[in-house]
Image: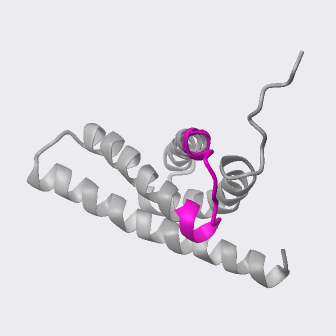
C-alpha cells in the first residue's frame, strides 16, 4: 500500500470517527434531555449503537473489508472499542482528578492520543487478515 493510500485510509478513519462522535453526542443529548434517561444508561446505549455504526462504516469505507468473517470482525471491533473506552475513561479521570484539567480538554486530549492506537488496532486486528481455521492436530 502506497504512502498516499495509507494516508487516505487514515483520513477516512478520522472522518468516520468524527461522524460517530457527532452521532454519539446527539444520542446522549436526546436520551438525557428528551427521554429523561439516566446518563450512564444513555452512555452505554450510545456506545453500543455508535460502535455498530462505526463498524459498518469502517468496514466498508475505511478498510474496505470483504468476505464472510464479519462476525469475527465485529467481535474484535467491539473488543477494541470497549478496551479503548475503558482506558480512555481511566485516562480522563486521571487528568481531571490529578492534573486538574477541565473534563472537556481531558477528553479531547485522550481522544487525540487514542486515535493512532485505535486505527492501528482496527486495521491490523479488527479487520486484519487473520485465519480463523482450526489447526489440525
Helix, strand or loop for the magenta stretch, by majority: helix
- Residue at the extreme top of the image, as rendered: 137
User: Is residue 30 toward the left or the right of residue 60 in the image?
Assistant: left
Q: Which residues are magenta?
A: 58-75
Residue nearer the viewer, 59 or 25: 59
Q: Residue 80's x, y, as percent?
A: 60, 44
Q: In the picture, residue 135 is in which quadrant?
A: top right
| Quadrant assignment for the N terminus | bottom right
Extreme-bottom residue of the structure: 4
Q: Is residue 24 magenta?
A: no
x and y, in percent, of residue 98 in the image: 56, 44
Q: Is residue 44 above or below residue 59?
A: above
Residue 98 visible, this angle: no
Residue shown at the point (11%, 46%) measured from the top left: 36
Q: Nearer the viewer, residue 8 or 102?
A: 8
Q: In terms of image quadrants, where is residue 42?
A: top left
Horizontal and vertical percent position of residue 26: 27, 63
Q: Is residue 131 left or right of residue 39?
A: right
Q: Is residue 34 visible?
A: yes
- The residue lying at 42 percent from left, 64 percent from top is 21
Amino acid at each position: 500500500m502506497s504512502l498516499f493510500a495509507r494516508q487516505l485510509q487514515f483520513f477516512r478513519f478520522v472522518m468516520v470517527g468524527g461522524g460517530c462522535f457527532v452521532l454519539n453526542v446527539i444520542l446522549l443529548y436526546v436520551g438525557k434531555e428528551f427521554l429523561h434517561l439516566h446518563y450512564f444508561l444513555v452512555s452505554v446505549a450510545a456506545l453500543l449503537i455508535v460502535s455498530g455504526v462505526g463498524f459498518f462504516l469502517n468496514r466498508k469505507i475505511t478498510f474496505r473489508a470483504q468476505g464472510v468473517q464479519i462476525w469475527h470482525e465485529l467481535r474484535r471491533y467491539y473488543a477494541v472499542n470497549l478496551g479503548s473506552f475503558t482506558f480512555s475513561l481511566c485516562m480522563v479521570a486521571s487528568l481531571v482528578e490529578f492534573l486538574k484539567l477541565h473534563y472537556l480538554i481531558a477528553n479531547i486530549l485522550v481522544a487525540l492520543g487514542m486515535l493512532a492506537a485505535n486505527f492501528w488496532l482496527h486495521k491490523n486486528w479488527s479487520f486484519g487478515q487473520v485465519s480463523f481455521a482450526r489447526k489440525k492436530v
